[in-house]
Image: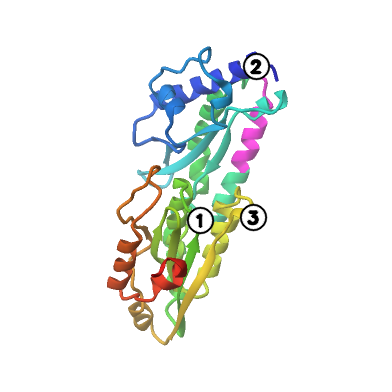
Amino acid sequence: MEDSELSSFIEQQVITFQLLNSMYLEDEFSIDSDMDSFLESCINNEFDITQANINEIPNSISFTISIKIPLEDSEKEEILPLKCTLPLQLNNSNDKKKLTEFYISSVDWINKESHQNLTRDFDQHIEEQSNDDMIISSDTLILDGIDWLQTNGPNYASNLEVESSKNNKNDTEGPFEFLREWIYLPMLYSKEKREDLITYARPFGISGFVSPGKPACICIEGHAKDIPKYLNDIRSISWADIPPRDKKMSTRAQERFLCQTKEEFESHRKFDPLEECHFKIHGKRSNHQSMDLLEQWLIEKDCPNAFHDLFPDLNK
């Protein structure tokens, strides 16, 4: 690809980013890419392609737009996060047909099956629009996709009351097997993946915590039959775009309890519904946490052996 053609493409992608950034409020538009001088120049409208070193421009810009979806059977609106990735570096001219990559985050008002159907139908719509000669820029494609989601999104909303009633009925008779699983990850940075870990846990009633950074760890506790389903959803849906070799999630320990009643089952929980926990974030890229504080916190949660199980190499 000629430098002039690539420069023109990069400039158009930057214009798309700047346009969308200006169209949406701060709580509706969040930047997922790491902040650097290039991104700062785009945000401040100071980017000049004629002065830029193309080889130093990143491969892409990623951001998430929180789309308001009006539900047909209620007066309220729900939020549907749509992650958009604008490629900046291309291998050949044919790559220009892929102006934007999309990812629809999971939400608690759309169940797993409906989310899969929504993603499939949305991808099909985007593919059709990408082949339309009228769609010549990424901003046109993104705005068309947002309009499609606002129009069609309500059709995929789950009947949460019916599902909750069904789940409660299945959980009233024992025995119940309680499982607490401790998971180690070499690193966990992606805001989108971290949010999915929490969102995917809600339908299963999973409690625990996510401690991101490098290294990272996850603790999940709930029904033994639900934990594998939850982890499979994370690996196959949320992490579907991650190469298998990079899905380095390792179970370091498990605790199981057979309970005869629901009250006994709940008594084994040591944590609130799954949430993200931070312990004195530091480091050049703010990607490390205080392991000493994490260890102390686990001891206070009556999990004295957890830190050793998760990080045997860090124990003195």
> What is the three-letter code of the residue carrying label 1?
Asn
**Image quadrant of residue 88?**
top right
Q: Is residue 135 above or below residue 199?
A: above
Say the numbered circle drawn on residue 244: 3
Residues packed near mark 1 inside 10 Å, few (<14), some (14 to 19) or many (20 plus): some
> Could you tell me residue 76's position as x and y percent?
35, 44
Q: Name the residue under label 1.
A: 111
Most distant residue in the front direction:
316
Say the numbered circle drawn on residue 3: 2
Left or right placement of residue 270 versus residue 103 in this view: left
Most distant residue in the bottom direction:
260
> Could you tell me residue 291's position as x and y percent?
35, 61
Look at the image and say whether residue 289 sits in the magenta stretch. Answer: no
Label 2 SS: helix
Residue that appears at 39% across and 85% down: 261
Look at the image and say whether residue 131 sits in the magenta stretch. Answer: yes
Is any atom of residue 302 visible in this view? Answer: yes
Is any atom of residue 165 visible in this view? Answer: no
Mark nearer the viewer, 1 or 3: 3
| Marks 2 & 1, CB-CB < 8 Å contact | no
Seen from the viewer's position, the closer of residues 102 and 183 is: 183
Seen from the viewer's position, the closer of residues 141 and 183 is: 183
For the magenta stretch, what is the residue range? 121-133
Q: Distance between the residues labelled 1 and 3?
A: 25 Å
